[in-house]
Image: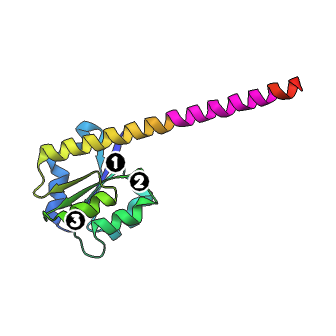
Amino acid sequence: MKYKVLAADDEYWSRENLRSLISWEDYSIEFLDPACDGEEVLERIEEEKPDIILTDVRMPFMDGLTLMERLRSKMPECGFIVLSGHNEFEYARQAIRQGAFAYLLKPIDRQELKDTVFAAMKKMQDNRSAREYYEVLSGEYFELQQRSLQSLLKIS
């Protein structure tokens, strides 16, 4: 499965740094054209359907935390990795409350970003596998209920 990553940061050099830090294609990851703020992400989200969003915590128009809040109900399976140049506990706490997978401090370390993205992908895959397994079990349970009911009706 190929994952899609979308970065949102108001600083051009930060966006370009995220694009070049990892050889995304080598890991079957499509790095979408970065967005410059949360509003742009919202405009593109339906069409591009990213699996992971790397978002700066502070951006004009719509910050990363507000973006997460707005997208959580629309895209519950999307993973968020929050990036910040601010080592402030309150930002990190809000990001975790919003369901962020991680909170990384700028300047972003190549290996830390790579490890974090891979861990997020693994968690997402595990969640998908568990959901698919649950759906199979639910279907089998329903079928078993139907057979039991039919057997009871035949006995009566």
Task: Please state the extent of the stretch shown in magenta in the rendering.
Answer: 133-150
Question: Mark 2–mark 3 contact, CB under 8 Å?
Answer: no
Along the line of sight, the residue nearer the viewer: 4 or 128 = 128
Question: Mark 2–mark 1 contact, CB under 8 Å?
Answer: yes
Q: Is residue 104 above or below residue 65?
A: above
Identify the residue shown where x is 32% and y is 38%: 122
Identify the residue shown where x is 23% and y is 37%: 26
Amino acid type indicated by mark 1:
Lys
Residue labelled with disc 3: 91
Q: Give the side of residue 114 with respect to residue 128, left or right.
A: left
Residue labelled with disc 1: 4
Q: Residue 112: x and y, percent?
A: 15, 45
Q: Is residue 48 above or below residue 150?
A: below
Quarter of the picture holding the N terminus: top left
Q: Residue 24: x and y, percent?
A: 23, 43
To which quarter of the image does residue 139 belong?
Answer: top right
As for residue 142 lying within the magenta part, the answer is yes
Q: Secondary structure at mark 1?
A: strand
Real-space Cα separation, disc 2 to disc 3, in angstroms: 26 Å
Give the numbered dot on residue 44.
none
Amino acid type indicated by mark 3:
Tyr
Q: Nearer the viewer, mark 3 or mark 1?
A: 3
Give the numbered dot on residue 49.
2
